[in-house]
Amino acid sequence: MENSSTNVIQKDMILLDKNVNSQDEAINQLIQQADNMNLINDVETFKKSVNDREKMASTAVGYNIAMPHGKSNSVVTPFIGFLQSTKPFRWNENEGELVTLIFLIAVPENDSSNLHLKFISKLSKKLLDNEFRNILSELKSNSEVFKYLNEAIN
């Protein structure tokens, strides 16, 4: 399966100004959208892979950002979903980490090229840039966010 970052971010997987209060709500909204777009073929299986990964270690990475990810046979097409929360919320009940920018990364189980690690690496480098994060927090149109994210990881 040949995949580049060019088609990994899709405009309809960008959810802006969402009123979410928990990790579960954010992940559920992103997974439901992925299901609506036929990017996954089994919501529960994919959700389990994301939650299992989250149990190993929190995917809150600081700077108000979380990068949950799942590797599952239920992923039809690799994707990065993005959710911008209207207000900071606690990512994990046991930790104080607040997030507003959530990136859901999904790759097929048999991804021998470790595509998800490449996406995480590219995104992480950009997210260290304060200006990049501020712009991402302020953009209010799917088209603008889509263009901005694609430029960042390509």
Image (cartoon, rainbow, N blue to C red):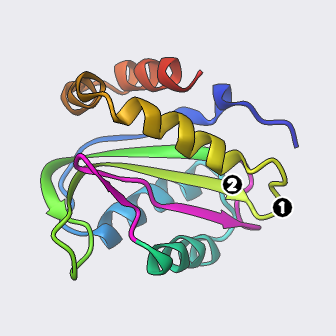
- Report if residue 95 is visible in the image: yes
Judge whether residue 13 can be spotted in this image.
no
146 with respect to 52 (left or right): left
Q: Is residue 100 above or below residue 54?
A: above
Q: In the image, residue 13 lies at what x, y percent?
A: 48, 42
State how many labels appear: 2
Q: Nearer the viewer, residue 87 or 134?
A: 134
Residue 94 shown left or right of residue 119 in the figure? left
Picture residue at 48% right of the left edge, 22% below the top: 152
Q: Is residue 76 in the magenta section?
A: yes
**x and y, in percent, of residue 51 in the image:** 49, 76
Was residue 39 drawn as part of the magenta stretch in this picture? no
Residue at point 59% right, 48% down? 37
Judge left or right: residue 123 versus residue 21: right
Q: Residues within 10 Å of mark 1 (few under 14, many from 20)?
A: few
Name the residue that disc number 2 marks.
107
Q: Measured from the top left, where is residue 153 in percent x and y?
A: 54, 26
The residue that disc 1 covers is 110
Question: Observer-nearest residue: 83 or 43?
Answer: 83
From the image, which quarter does the C terminus lie in? top right
The N terminus - image quarter: top right
Magenta-colored span: 58-77
Q: Which residue sits furthest left?
A: 87
